[in-house]
Amino acid sequence: MGRMSDMTSNLPIKLKKEPLIDAVFEVRFSCAVPASIVVPGSLFNNLEGGKTIESLPLSQLPKPIRDADPNLKFAPLSRIDWNGFFISIGDSSLSVSCKYPYCGWRIFIKAIEDVMQALAQSNVVTAVDRYSMKYVDLIPSSSNQQKVSMINFKVSIADHQLEKEPFQLRIEIPRDGLVHAVQVVSSAQATLHTGIVKEGLIIDVDSFSDQKGISIHSLLNGFTEKLEAIHKANKAMFFDCISTETLELLEPEYE
């Protein structure tokens, strides 16, 4: 399994066989009142275009019960369908995700910036704790042996080298001043919002930056450059995770 040489400086601009099934920007924060109460109205007032909103099942749970479970702290309680995006709002989190198929980074970054400006105008965020960019790719594959060969890794445990067994791996890799939570699942099934079901090898790269309680205005200062940096770092990590043969299979295009 070959490793891409100098991948961070020579990233493909496009894959003809696009494996991307999900792209999500998320910000987590502290706030004076639950964001789920105030933010949806601010987004409706400040974002242009058609919008609809729906309550998600967790919104039916009383807040004390949600607060008692750490796994629910950042869970979305409502979702806005806005143009080609979904905006999910929790008590102390907000995320922007692209509808399938992916619209492309130029459109996505503009949507993130518009939503974050609307979040700032809600005046509910007292401190930003972290922001992240997650991309999920699904690559069709046949045998487990082929799936193992698609990933740029070598795994052995108890003197056994992984060769053709089903696997699920998660690791956090610090790089570029970020932490990249990489999850690889050999046999996965994903149901898209369109109802389409896809099966194959999943590579999930969630890149995040801890902010230690800065103000939202500090985060938005130079925000475009911060988004460009985390996007490029996430993209480089994905290409570093796949073998040279897998990259060729996806038919990359370069500038």
Image (spheres, rainbow, N blue to C red):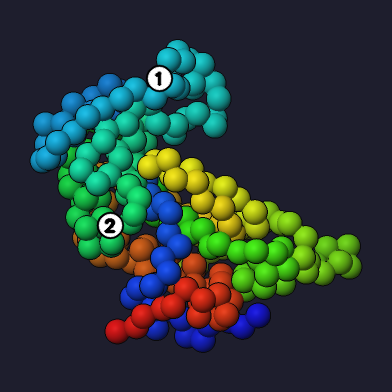
Q: Nearer the viewer, residue 233 or 209?
A: 233
Mark pair 1, 2: CA separation: 29 Å
Left or right, 141 with respect to 129, comes to right
The picture places residue 3, in percent across and down from the top left corner, at: 58, 81
Q: Residue at x 54, y 32 (%)?
A: 71
Q: Nearer the viewer, residue 102 or 124?
A: 102
Q: Residue at x 14, y 36 (%)?
A: 50
Q: Secondary structure at mark 1?
A: helix
Per the image, the residue denoted by label 1 is 59
Q: Residue at x 49, y 22 (%)?
A: 67
Task: Identify the image quadrant of the N terminus.
Answer: bottom right
Q: Residue at x 17, y 47 (%)?
A: 114
Per the image, the residue denoted by label 2 is 103
Amino acid type of the residue tagged 1 in the rendering: Ser
Q: Secondary structure at mark 2?
A: loop
Left or right, 83 with respect to 240, comes to left
Mark 1–mark 2 contact, CB under 8 Å? Answer: no
Residue 91 in view: no
Q: Residue furthest bottom?
A: 5
The picture places residue 135, in percent across and down from the top left corner, at: 43, 56
Task: Identify the image quadrant of the C terminus.
Answer: bottom left
Local crowd at mark 1 within 10 Å, few (<14), some, or many (≥20)? some
Q: Earlier in the sequence, mark 1 or mark 2?
A: 1
Residue 86 in view: yes
Quadrant location of residue 167? bottom right
Amino acid type of the residue tagged 2 in the rendering: Cys
The picture places residue 154, in percent across and down from the top left corner, at: 72, 72
